[in-house]
Amino acid sequence: MTDILNEATLRAAMKTELPLLYYPSIGSTNTEARRLLHEGKTGLRLLVAGEQTAGRGRQGKRFYSPAGTGVYFSLVLPWKGETADAVTVTTAASVAVCRALEETAGLQPQIKWVNDIYLNGRKVCGILTEAVAPPETKATHLIIGIGINITTADFPQDIENAGGLGVALSRAALVAAVCEQLLQTATKPFESYADYYRARSLLTGKEIRFFHNGITANATAIGIDDSGGLIVRLTDGTLQVLRSGEITVRENPQVNK
């Protein structure tokens, strides 16, 4: 199939009309979105790139974003909630991506709390949500950055466990589907999509290691609470709810338990 990604194909695929910017190549759509906000260009906006030369992930990690093999975009949303609620919006984005992949490609991805989407044991999507308060304005915005590997196969050696969807589909249609889903879920309470999120949780029942507030610990992931937090059971039997942190699945939990 012929897959063309540009402003025209994006506008044709979108059901909701909104300000849209397309860049054949850019450093980072999240960085550009932040720059525009600080210039006073506020309000709902979608930024899409054909490639990113400095794609960003959480904890300062990079997101590999080569041309022609994936979709990389940022949705800017006006936001009047608490900054801490950005975690809930990340869960909404995870749901939006999964629903869009089901809709456009018939896939059944899973969510690795809190911001990664997995398919067949490989990370195919990363989500970076950032809260921004532009100077000289009262409006607070959230920038929701999403990168999805579609046919990406050759990853740099320092990127572990990454993969692509491995299917042929329209990149413009996928961006549009994710955005439509996200516009529907981003401002809704977690409870409205909690069952869907829990059903696709990759971590539930798994032995994990988490890094939070400078501390690394082993635990078992028990489930997702009513606000999207990850419930874990520590090795001493106590329960803890994580609202942020880095999680890895322990492949050999019997070792160094």
Image (cartoon, rainbow, N blue to C red):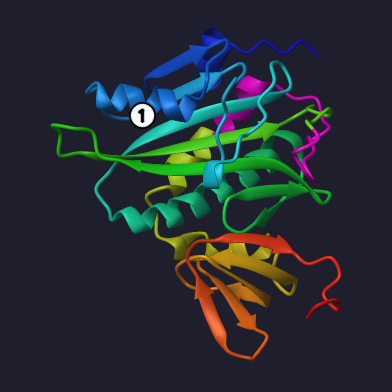
Q: Quadrant of residue 4?
A: top right
Report the side of 107 relative to 182 (left or right): right
Q: Amino acid at mark 1?
A: Arg
Taking the magenta stretch, the answer to whether it contains residue 168 is: yes
- The majority secondary structure of the magenta stretch comes to loop
Q: Nearer the viewer, residue 165 or 61?
A: 61
- Residue found at x 82% / y 51%: 121
- Residue 236 on image: x %, y %: 64, 91
Question: Compared with residue 48, is residue 200 higher up or lower down, i.e. above or below?
Answer: below
Report the side of 31 relative to 115 (left or right): left
Farthest residue to the bottom: give it: 237
- Residue 141 on image: x %, y %: 30, 39
Q: Nearer the viewer, residue 152 or 60?
A: 60
- Residue found at x 53% / y 47%: 59
Q: Is residue 15 visible?
A: no
Quarter occupied by the N terminus? top right
Quarter occupied by the C terminus? bottom right
Local crowd at mark 1 within 10 Å, few (<14), some, or many (≥20)? many
Taking the magenta stretch, the answer to whether it contains residue 37 is: no
- Residue 13 on image: x %, y %: 56, 20
Q: Which residue is mark 1?
A: 34
Question: Compared with residue 146, is residue 25 higher up or lower down, i.e. above or below?
Answer: above
Question: Compared with residue 146, is residue 22 higher up or lower down, i.e. above or below?
Answer: above
* Residue range highlighted in magenta: 157-178
- Residue found at x 67% / y 30%: 64
- Residue 37 on image: x %, y %: 29, 27
Total marks placed? 1
- Residue found at x 71% / y 69%: 208
Q: Nearer the viewer, residue 155 or 9?
A: 155
Give the SS element for disc 1. helix
